[in-house]
Amino acid sequence: MKGKFSISQTIMYILLSLWALTTLFPFVWVVNNSFKPRNLIITDTFAPAAGDKFTMANYTLAFKRINIGGAYLRSLIVSVSVMAAVVLLAGLAAYALARYQFKGRALLDSLIVASMMFPVFCTIIPVFTMQKSWGIASSGHAGLSLLSTALPQIAGNLTFAIIILRGYIRGLPIDLEESAYLEGCSAIQIFFKIIVPIAKPSFATVAIFSFLWSYNDLFTQMFFLRSKAEFTITRLLNELTSMEGTNYGLMAAAVTLVVIPVLIVYIFLQKYIIKGMTAGALKG
Amino acid sequence: MESMIYKKKGPLFLFLVPAFVFIIVYLFYPFIVNIINSFSVIQGLGNLPAGVNAPWYQNYVRLFQDQKFKTALVNTLWMLAGTVVFQVGLALLLSLMVDNIRKGAQFYRTVYFFPIVISAAALGLLFNMMFMMQGGMINQVLAGLGTKAVNWKEKFSIQTMLIPVMWQYVGFYFVIIVTGLNNISEDIYEAAKIDGADGIKRVRYITLPLLFNVLCTCVTLSVTGALKVFDLPWIMFPNGMPVDSTWLTGTYMYYSTFNLGDVDYGSAIAVFIVALGVIIARLANTLLKEKDY
Amino acid sequence: MKKFLAGMLSLTFALGLTAGCSSAPTAESSSPPPAESEQATSDQPAEQSAEQSADQPPDAAQAVTLNVFSTYAGSDGNAPNYQDALAAWQQGTGNKINDTSATADETVKGRIRTDFSAGSEPDVLFYFTGADASSFLDKVLTVDEIRAQYPSYATNMREDTSPKATDGKWYAVPVNGYWENLFVNKKVLDAAGVSLPDAGYTWDQFLIDCQKIKDAGLTPIAASFVDVPHYWWELSIFNNTSPATHNTIPQDINDDAAKAWIAGMNDIKAVYDKGFFPENALSAKDEELQELFFTDQAAFLLDGSWRANTIVTRASDDDEKIDEARLAEFTVVNFPDKGLGRKSTDVIGGMSSGWYITRKAWDDPAKQAAVVDFVTFMSSDEQVSKFAGANSATALQNGVTVDEATLNSLNKEVIAIINAATAFTPAVQDAVSGDARDAMFQAIPQMLTGSVTADQLIGDFIAAFTPA
């Protein structure tokens, strides 16, 4: 595969870079504008934040009004819990749905597809009432409030995770599992010793998205996180910018502050996607 | 093609029960309440039902007479076709290319993820500033070329609404397909090379068949995604603007539930969306299975 | 991987729980509480002040934690005042507050309704008095009920101007109010050669001015009928009614109120047909079209009192110092009148929110005195003066006291308008809020494009609206 630049390689690089421009642009635009005076964001939106167009005012304003550190921590607690639970539970269920033949499997498949479309604003009220009766919602206790946010998010992310993992596991050759079985491994052992390592890229993908969607899921957070001592970073910055419809500088700074941890998580988990490529030496 | 290992069904319950307990308690129980709600009278989200509709199926009759819902359904079907063809298609194309370049794959993989991370509020603002009639980015370029300002959000409202949504979620399917590609070992490619299959042939005869399951997953996800897409369209085109022409099933359900407080009607729309989604997803999966497997 | 996952799960939940234990559920306040606590005790009801000496904080055993909700959150101009007041009250009484304030968007309104139906409502709340409150009126107390036990409760407020609920009773003790009027960008007027409107601005003169502005290639009025038709709807109807009749709701398509509403809608359509609104008034959000006003492309903006804060914000790039020269390019004038029942100095305004005490707190012997004391403190003359400042009307018997030195040019113009107002009339849309009203607002674009007539629009409303 080594060689000089071929025409097809050049064309691919051009096309890939064109798309990369479209995806990079909004990010650069947001970060750039977060360092600009708020009135220039509308009138001179594409100018670089340099010289007299540079200001830290948006960030000082954001930091002045809120306690950001605790909110980051609470975001991580909720989203990492959701991510871990989703990866584990969805992995087990997806494995079973991919490998076992049993009555009612088609029904379970349909139930999962159906539940992916349940809009969260249709399910939130019963979930709230239920969690209130268990004493975990609206209890005034920060730990319980975080738990009551995480639990519905786990359920909400399970379904897409099962679908992705099931598709991936189905595509895996069954040979490795059979040889492990001959060596005396039980199905559970096969899951942890064979499936999890070779499906690591897919698990990493699911982990990224469940982290991201838990982190960005403002609606559930609005219901279950109430006092500032409970706020996650997404919830806190939404409160800050909610009324300031026209202070786009503050909004750009808030978006930047929210996005950074997600990108760190993505870049960190991406290593597993790549590692899967080299380590998962499958024999087709 | 069931293996010996999976003849004993004992562990099956251990695998399925934890996930399905969550799904049943947090998704199905509330959705059953939602179905009951669709037959009740509820004004204002969070209020208790104030009796049963007369006749009890009234909301479902209303669905078929509601002009706005008809608009929403037609627009959503466009969205659905667009997501399957463009989102998944483009994601497949991009991931195949990234898989075949020698350097910099890491860079593209990272950058293509960006649009999913940025909140819909920020993307909505950006797109509004691009398509804005007065001094928007596109119209500034047009002015430079001596062309009159175009009111994109009126003249091309559907396109202006669909393109950002398509664009935003290409990265999602891209990541899933890239993950699937990693599963195809170099050995197969090497073997194929010896057999003389390279370039397009390699993609057609090796990559695509091996990606089949992953692509099925993407189709299922894009169908369900298109039916409930809500945030970016709502921020760019609230209240079906201009003049009730850009409703989607997702935005119309939100509007009915929150803006009008017509919770029971919103619930009926949700039930309809779920039923439609299951039918389309099943249909798509049977079609795909018959063709290739 | 198994160990890793299990470890992660238990670790994160453990962290979650300890984080909960270590952080007491109290309001975070950024500023130190003011030292004075006299009024906290001086407003105590008769029975209570006998038991508690005025200068001694209550014992710790008596201290309670109140759950408080308000809409003073986010970037509400009063959020800092609110935090200061909470800190002062906690300091003065030894009680604690669990503050769950949030900006009242549709989600938060849903949350409040859910709380009331699930029995997890706060002890006191500062919330709207219109239809948004109608579902929980049986779970809060009227001022009269409270006065039966605490005779001095809210006696510093005028009952006649305090906002009433949809059942006509007085529940909520108001703080600051609102008004709706016409903001002006003077730079655009200058560019079009239009002179600044004076006190008796007439509708005819307004239309002439708009034409001049349009001829100069500028946009006369920044407005969107996509998401915020509220102000044009309200003021156009007000121009066809009078302060005395404005809050009459049409019952029949032929009654006087219906005629006034139809005339108001036709006034909007006339302005629309003349092209005085932005060309994309039906295809752009209010927030986008407001930009035309802030960036010197549109002359007029009809909006509520809160927009004065936005103008101050947008006039300068820094919160620390206001750009007075830029701010002076904006002003506010009375909405032009048609010379029918309404004089141009008759202003739409009033109070649409207030402090409620819930039955849940009232029936709790440990909390009853504390919630009454809390509302009394939050609605004291001093606090109301602070919250209302120069920008809004209040229901205070004695009016507000404002420090002139802290006012900017826009504040002073607002005060002049408020002082010269011949009437403050509450917005009738608050009396009819609900799905019938919102469906009517949603159909206004159809009326403007001509697919629905004003008669049909109002007729459909009358058919759908059920009075409380």
Image (cartoon, coloured by chain):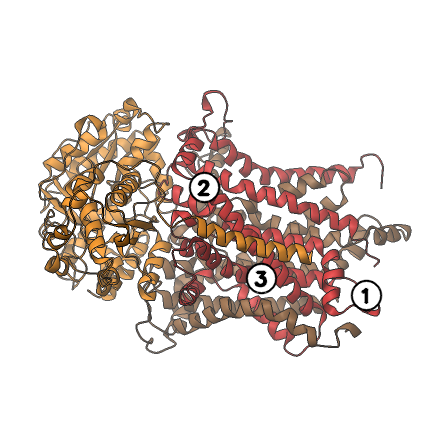
Chain colours: A red, B brown, C orange
At mark 1, the secondary structure is helix
Residue bearing mark 3: A158
**Chain ID for label 1?**
A
**Chain ID for label 3?**
A
The label nearer to you, 1 versus 2, is 1
Kind of residue indicated by mark 3:
Leu
- Asked whether residue B188 appears in the rendered view, the answer is yes
x and y percent of residue B7 in the render?
75, 77
Number of numbered callouts drawn: 3
x and y percent of residue C119 in the render?
32, 65
The label nearer to you, 3 versus 2, is 3
Mark 1 and mark 2 in contact? Answer it, CB < 8 Å.
no
Kind of residue indicated by mark 2:
Leu
Q: Is residue C415 left or right of residue B223?
A: left
Residue bearing mark 1: A180
Residue bearing mark 2: B125
